[in-house]
Amino acid sequence: MIYVVIVFLWVALLLYLVMGGADFGAGIIEMFTLNKNKSHARKIMYNAIGPIWEANHMWLIIAIVILFVGFPVIYATMSTYLHIPLTVMLMGIIARGTALTFRNYDAVHDNMQKVYNKIFVYSSFITPLFLGIIAGSAVSGRVDPQATNFMDAYIYSWLNWFSVAIGFFTVALCGFLAAIYLIGETRDEAERKSFIRKAKLMNVAAVVAGSLVFIASVKENIPLVQWVFGNVIGITAVSAATISLIALWYLIAKGKRFIIRVLAGFQMTMILLTTTYKHFPNIIILKNGGHLSLIEDQGAEKTIQALGIALLVGSLFILPALFYLIWSFQYKPEQADSELQGH
Amino acid sequence: MAARSQMALSLGFHIIFSCIGMVMPFFMAVSHFLWLRTGNPVYQNVTKAWSKGVAIFFATGAVSGTVLSFELGLLWPTFMKHAGPIFGMPFSLEGTAFFIEAIALGFFLYGWNRFNRWFHWFTGVVVGISGLLSGILVVAANAWMNSPTGFDLVNGKYTNIDPIKAMFNPAWFSQALHMSVAAFAATGFAVAGVHALMILRKQNVNFHMKAFRIAAIFGVIAAILQPLSGDVSAKMVAKRQPAKLAAMEAHFKTKPYSPLIIGGIPDVKNKKVDYAIELPGMLSFMVHDDFKTPVKGLDQIPVKDQPPIAVTHYAFQIMVALGMLMMGLGVLYLIALWKKRTWFDKHWFLKLFIWATPIGFIAVEAGWTVTEVGRQPWIIQGVMRTADAVTPMPGISYSFYLFTAVYFTLSLAVIFLLHRQIMMVPEIYDNPNPAKA
């Protein structure tokens, strides 16, 4: 049963990275859109993410609930030593969710819209940045339960080149995902081109940020190269991601809509696989060389049993409904398009 | 202390957002149903207007809920380390319920004219039911903190953990019932009050009157039923948490014919209550169903295990007083409905409801204070002290200031938005072609 729970945790993280990431990315893309095109791009984006954004962010809640029910020691350690980046991320989540809702549901359209837009855009950037920092910190080996002073325990646990580089890498990935997603959302050729340009930009940014991660890992004495390339799965996953990236660009040129999304999702899967495979089942690496592991630090057996069953049963309800939701608003032939415009 | 304030603040806000977010879908569903049955477009407009409110509150409720799921660990890591696996079960189910709510809301908000009408209506109902379920589950988790079960504590180690038993702890039912009914009462009165104000201002009277009556009937029925669930809750508290009950009542001395103390100023030093109305034997009667059996007083509880008496007592008195007030209003409303239809147009009648707009939520917050402050100094009743659970990180007060600022901004923003929504009613819904709304 523990493996069922771990698979759910991993899948929830992956889906959050892909769905939530594309969602954050929409804000990042907005940031890099020229002012004159902004309002139109915004409209496309809102139509694309409006009905499903709430659901996209549920994956984070699922992941965190699995963590605190099933792996309380890991949850408690993270929330103690990574308190500050987690708080910043939460602020980002609050600001972003409310700004998006408010700008859509404010009955009066006036200067307040500008305020909502600003908040939305900045928080779309900051939230994944800190999400990446948190993920990077987990494996950077800087979390130090034996630290005696404030800086070591609560600041340097996450403030290092490696974690920050991963933060920027995450931001670039989100922007990339969103651009790929939005390419298929517009029928206007000029806009399509503009989203393709954004995707290219984000692709380059991801490569640059990815290289920075490697450089930072050398500087911080983290054996990242060995983690990624030191095993067959890692090498295979990286190669598969690279090949699929080439295929992706070819298919974009061909004007495909659905398959490019699948490929972008596949790349995220490969990235998450490479970064988690070598450590599995360890999830947090501590400064003293110790680690917290999903196997050794799991909660009581009965809890894991119950949690596993709850997740299985829950997914029976959630997944079909979610697929139907996405299908309804993405692929189902639209019946009354004019009605929606006035929304 | 800062950690406790931050938690109280976060929960205090979350409770309002989520109550409205979980009850309003039911109002919406009723009005939607009436529209589908009667074809009267006013009902459709009411539904749409409410659905925007729901969207706003759901988003704020959802983000404040996300924040809370992290805050539990950020502020109380020691508590979560031990309690997570025991009382986490309702949270994992709540995650599911909440997910379904989010999906259903996506269908509902964006599904106008896209789906079969009754399927669309059904998604709205699912929003309400899954919202209510997640509320019940979260309260069940809180009930566990009041009546911990499902584990054995041996030499400081938590063993033999049974999460299912912990979820169905003895207090879950009474607390969940009391909270759900309270949510309906508070939201019903709050929404009705706002619409009453608009009727009084003679704006879109037809629209607001329909909205007022749907919201009010929910609030009224819930308010009249609430004392019953309160009685169930009080008996449970008496059994599992005598210290809390004693503090609620400021009941200092254990003696036969224990009195029910109404109001008054508790004098903790001299162990008496000044200026209070005492009804001899009534407390015994309420707890034990007879007038004589003594009720455990604060004199039998060690001082180090006593909650803050004054706060608990005042909060409880406020909750009960406001609850009674709402019940009274509820009775008036029913009289109006059955005998005196003309009252609906009377200023004094509408004014009463306008004044009652906030009282439901004040009562909810007071009740929340009773259950949380009344449990102190324990975070898990009788098992773990709050002081032992708090995060070791220094400087939590800064985090408290930050969250305070954020929540206040958020509330102001929500009020501002709702105000704008309501003000726009004439423009949006007086349109001869309602489909454009």
Image (cartoon, rainbow, N blue to C red):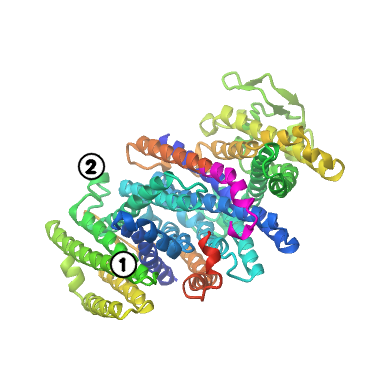
Q: Pick out the residue farthest to the left.
A: A219
Q: Is residue B83 visible?
A: no
For the point 69% across and 58% down, the residue is B41
User: What is the x, y in percent for residue B248?
Assistant: 63, 33
Q: Which residue is mark 1?
A: A195
Image coordinates of residue B255 in percent, x first then y, are: 71, 28
* Residue lying at 25% horizontally and 45% vertically, measured from the top left: A155
Q: How many marks?
A: 2
Q: Nearer the viewer, residue B232 or A94?
A: A94
Q: Which residue is mark 2?
A: A151
Give the answer, above or below, for where B151 lies relative to B221: below
Q: Which residues are magenta?
A: B417-437
- Say what secondary structure mark 2 lies in: helix
Instruction: Choose mark 1 or mark 2, whichever is in front.
Output: 1
Amino acid type for the residue under numbered disc 1: Phe
Q: Amino acid at mark 2?
A: Met
